[in-house]
Image (cartoon, rainbow, N blue to C red):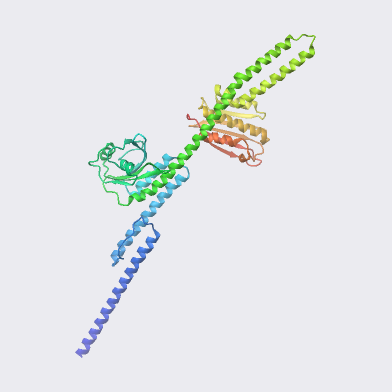
């Protein structure tokens, strides 16, 4: 009996050990499978940055939990970075002014890097660096608009020398003005990456911390932002070049108009006036016995006077003297008086405006009234002009047939370049049968 009992106990123990061994093997297989799934699936769904976990799969549930938590944090951080990049890319694509893009990008970089602050700086020809965008959680570093020398030991000098990302983890013994400023601000760790525009080194983007060193690998993440920054700067430069080109064309056109108007007034018109006076004198001196000759001279004098009036009208259209001498208010009144369609004019502009703004506004209203006469079949037209803040707002509205199409050659195409060259805007609303409304906004600051 004892032998049987011992045998039963041995069998039960053996079965128990077997079950334990099977359980351990299954746990190990599950752990290995979970590790491979975590390492494979997550690596397949995220880029190389965040870095991959290397080495064999974890052999314990605790290790698996730690790894999954680490990978989850990497994914969250990557998602936050992508969201920040999308926000900045939206600003770039919408043509937001560079100053606003710089400010938004500095903030996004600081938040993504988990740093105390961030800045965007441009290299200047005189060997200094100018801060064009800045964000800081605490008063530290260089404020917006700061300009300092790049001499000494600092990230700007290093990027100028190498054109590569750079890092400094202490300014205690660093020489130079920039290092001294950052040392006084308590900056301990900083990382910067170059900003390249159209293949040329433009500046740098930097993040900094007062206490904790910045994590390794942050350079690659910052480089994603600087790529967008380079695009934003290139777009802004292209737009500025286009506006400058338009402005030069407009200025050259205005100068030509003024020269022609002056030449007509001082030369041709004066000559015709002299000839008209001589003809009138000849008419008066013609004997009464020669009525036919006197009649012919009078007819020539009348024709010359009519031609002189037409020339004066053409001269006023080229560049009206009343605009140069009296400003926009009397010039618009003259346009309204000459219009064959009644014009309800309301001008609220106060003092003289910048010459470029006055010329653009005058020709806009002149062309709009000419279009109303030629195409609108209107019975009346309203012209409203008002200065609001630093903008001149003009509106021309008629009660005609509507359906105006600027692309069909209405004469407003050329004016669009003039208006946009001054950083102005133009809008056209012309539903069929509902009349036409033209609205223009122009800056009143000096060009």
Residue sitting nearer the eye, 45 or 339: 45
Number of marks in picture: 0
Q: Residue furthest bottom?
A: 1
Residue sitting nearer the eye, 379 or 126: 126
Which residue lies at the image location 77% right of the left edge and 15% below the top edge? 295
In-image side of 216 versus 397 (left or right): left
Q: Position of residue 434 (x, y in %)?
A: 64, 40
Instruction: Relative to 217, say whether 301 is above or below.
Output: above
Q: Quadrant of residue 287?
A: top right
Q: Position of residue 9 (x, y in %)?
A: 23, 84
Any part of residue 370 in sight = yes
In-image side of 373 versus 29 (left or right): right
Which residue lies at the image location 41% right of the left edge and 39% below the top edge? 99
Q: Position of residue 134 (x, y in %)?
A: 36, 41
Q: Quadrant of residue 127?
A: top left
Which residue lies at the image location 65% right of the left edge and 42% below the top edge? 432
Q: Quadrant of residue 155?
A: top left
Which residue lies at the image location 48% right of the left edge and 39% below the top edge? 239
């Amino acid at each position: 009996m004892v032998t049987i009992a011992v045998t039963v106990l041995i069998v039960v123990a053996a079965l128990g050990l077997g079950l334990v061994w099977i359980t351990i093997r299954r746990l190990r297989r599950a752990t290995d499978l979970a590790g491979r799934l975590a390492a494979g699936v997550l690596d397949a769904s995220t880029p190389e940055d965040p870095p991959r976990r290397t080495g064999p799969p974890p052999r314990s549930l605790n290790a698996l939990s730690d790894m999954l938590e680490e990978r989850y944090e990497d994914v969250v951080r990557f998602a936050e970075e992508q969201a920040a990049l999308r926000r900045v890319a939206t600003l770039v694509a919408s043509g937001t002014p560079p100053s606003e893009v710089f400010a938004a990008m500095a903030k996004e970089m600081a938040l993504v890097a988990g740093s105390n602050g961030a800045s965007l700086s441009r290299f200047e020809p005189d060997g200094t660096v100018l801060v064009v965008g800045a964000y800081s959680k605490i008063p530290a570093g260089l404020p917006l608009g700061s300009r300092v020398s790049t001499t000494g030991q600092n990230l700007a000098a290093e990027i100028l020398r190498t054109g590569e990302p750079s890092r400094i983890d202490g300014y205690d013994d660093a020489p130079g003005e920039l290092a001294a400023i950052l040392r006084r601000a308590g900056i301990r760790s900083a990382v910067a990456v170059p900003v390249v525009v159209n293949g040329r080194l433009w500046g740098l983007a930097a993040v900094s911390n007062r206490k904790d060193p910045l994590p390794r690998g942050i350079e690659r993440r910052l480089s994603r932002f600087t790529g967008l920054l380079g695009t934003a700067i290139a777009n802004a430069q292209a737009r500025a070049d286009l506006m400058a080109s338009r402005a030069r064309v407009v200025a050259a056109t205005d100068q030509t108009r003024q020269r022609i108007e002056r030449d007509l007034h001082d030369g041709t018109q004066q000559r015709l006036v002299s000839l008209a006076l001589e003809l009138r004198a000849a008419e008066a001196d013609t004997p009464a016995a020669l009525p036919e000759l006197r009649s012919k001279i009078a007819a020539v004098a009348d024709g010359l006077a009519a031609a002189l009036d037409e020339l004066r009208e053409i001269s006023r259209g080229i560049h009206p003297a009343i605009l140069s001498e009296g400003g926009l208010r009397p010039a618009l009144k003259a346009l309204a008086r000459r219009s064959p369609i009644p014009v309800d004019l309301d001008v609220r502009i106060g003092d003289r405006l910048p010459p470029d703004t006055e010329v653009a506004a005058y020709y806009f209203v002149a062309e709009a009234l000419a279009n109303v006469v030629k195409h609108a079949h209107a019975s009346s037209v309203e012209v409203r002009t008002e200065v609001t803040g630093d903008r001149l707002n003009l509106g021309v509205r008629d009660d005609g047939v509507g359906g105006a199409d600027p692309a069909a050659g209405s004469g407003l195409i050329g004016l669009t370049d003039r208006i946009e060259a001054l950083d102005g805007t133009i809008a056209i609303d012309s539903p069929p049968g509902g009349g036409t409304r033209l609205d223009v906004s122009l800056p009143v600051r000096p060009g």
